[in-house]
Image (cartoon, rainbow, N blue to C red):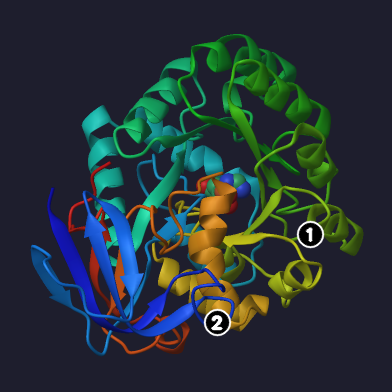
Amino acid sequence: MTSTAFTNIQTLVTNDPELGDGLLGVISGAHVVVENGVIVSISTKAPTGVDSEIDCAEKTLLPGFVDSHTHLIFAGDRAEEFAERAKGNRYTAGGIATTVSATRSASDNQLRNNTQKLLNEALSSGTTTVEIKSGYGLTQKDESRSVEIASEFTDETTLLAAHVVPVEFKDNPDSYVKLVIEKMIPESRAKWIDVFCDHGAFDIDQTRRILRAGVEHGMKPRIHANQLQRTEAIQLAIELGATSADHLSASTLQDIEALANSNVVATLLPGAEFSTSHEGKLGRKFLDAGASVAIASDCNPGSSFTTSMPFCIAAAVSLLGFTVEEAVRAATLGGAQALGREDIGRVSVGARADFALLSTPSYIHLAYRPGVNIVSNTYKAGMAVTQWQK
Ligand code: NIG
Ligand code: FE
């Protein structure tokens, strides 16, 4: 058994208000001891008899970011589409088809290398857990290979075969829904099932049928809800006991209340709000209603091409009305809740030693220094890592 101590931590974010101050349970001058990848003690007394020490003076240690919503299996990019939006064009689901054809033409290794590159970026900005969706294959073979490649990088894999109706089914969307239900779901090894329930994608009845089929197959449901237009997607998420409903930009106050009174986590995606269009202070409404809130990167080549959770924290603060503490908590503990995980997203005895170590004395700098990478090291199970591995 080897032990490592993170010592003299100027600011330790535990996410447990019973362990320290405020919403983030902050402790000053703490020492954290890790054994076999798990936290075994948190104290303001210096530890003795440990095998190695990492001095964290003048630094901040916080749980590694839990990015609970990404679309990382794709090829190509859509920079021109982004530039058109800067001239006033609106984001629509239509651009997804461009990425679908690039993804279908890519080799397994191209997809794998692209994902590895993006995950290395995420790791260098403090992310330690990711969920990865399929959704740019849209054939049985291409969806299945997307989930297989995703599973090389994470256990949090999601089948999003119902991202949009592929062109070859344009005149008969229901037969695509049938293919998803009868062929793709039964053969999928993904943990989660997701549907883009929106204008230009799938309607509420198709979404219900697909999510139910996934649940029958043993997958857990999550949903893209109210991104472009309001539907009954939040009500469906509650009806099916989904773990998380994501995007939520076009939600009404009644939707927000309903979500806050349920066990469904509200996952907001500041990168997508930043890169498409955003409703002012969207987050504040969910936070004030008392919802459990997560933020995630939504990394994808269309609506949010960022892997940086610190950027998402900064955007949540400046665009969505979060306090810095709410944003940091939503990017760590909130993400863990959106994946139904209790072993991550917190610094507590028994939790995995997944940490982001900041070069700054406070977590406030995550929002205060936007666009600057202040993460000096990322630790997974107590080990400093620079190349993403599962
Ligand atoms: O979550 N909205 C659906 N899917 C992605 C965007 C996909 C794309 O534009 O390529 C999202 O924002
Ligand atoms: Fe998404």
| Residue 389 appears left or right of 274 | left
Look at 55% across and 82% down and name the residue there.
Answer: 324
Secondary structure of the residue carrying tag 1 is loop
Look at 78% across and 73% down and name the residue there.
Answer: 288
- Pointer 1 residue: 250
Look at 80% across and 49% down and name the residue there.
Answer: 262
Q: Nearer the viewer, residue 118 or 38?
A: 38
Q: Residue 9 at x, y = what percent?
A: 28, 82
Q: Are marks 2 and 1 in contact (CB under 8 Å)?
A: no
Q: Residue 36 at x, y = what percent?
A: 21, 49
The correct choice, above or below, for 376 with respect to 195 in the image is below
Secondary structure of the residue carrying tag 2 is helix
Q: Quadrant of residue 7?
A: bottom left
Residue projecting furthest to the right: 254
Give the label, 2 or 1, closer to the camera: 2
* Numbered circle sitting on residue 324: 2
User: Around disc 2, counting alpha carbons within 10 Å, would you say few (fewer than 14), some (14 to 19), or many (20 or more)?
Assistant: many
Give whichever of discs 2 and 1 has the lower sequence position.
Answer: 1
The correct choice, above or below, for 37 with respect to 277 in the image is above
* Numbered circle sitting on residue 9: none
Q: Residue 373 at x, y = what percent?
A: 30, 77
Task: For marks 2 and 1, give the CA distance.
Answer: 24 Å
Q: Nearer the viewer, residue 51 or 390?
A: 51
The correct choice, above or below, for 304 with respect to 219 in the image is below
Which amino acid type is shown beneath numbered disc 1? Ala
Viewer can see residue 107: no
Which amino acid type is shown beneath numbered disc 2? Val
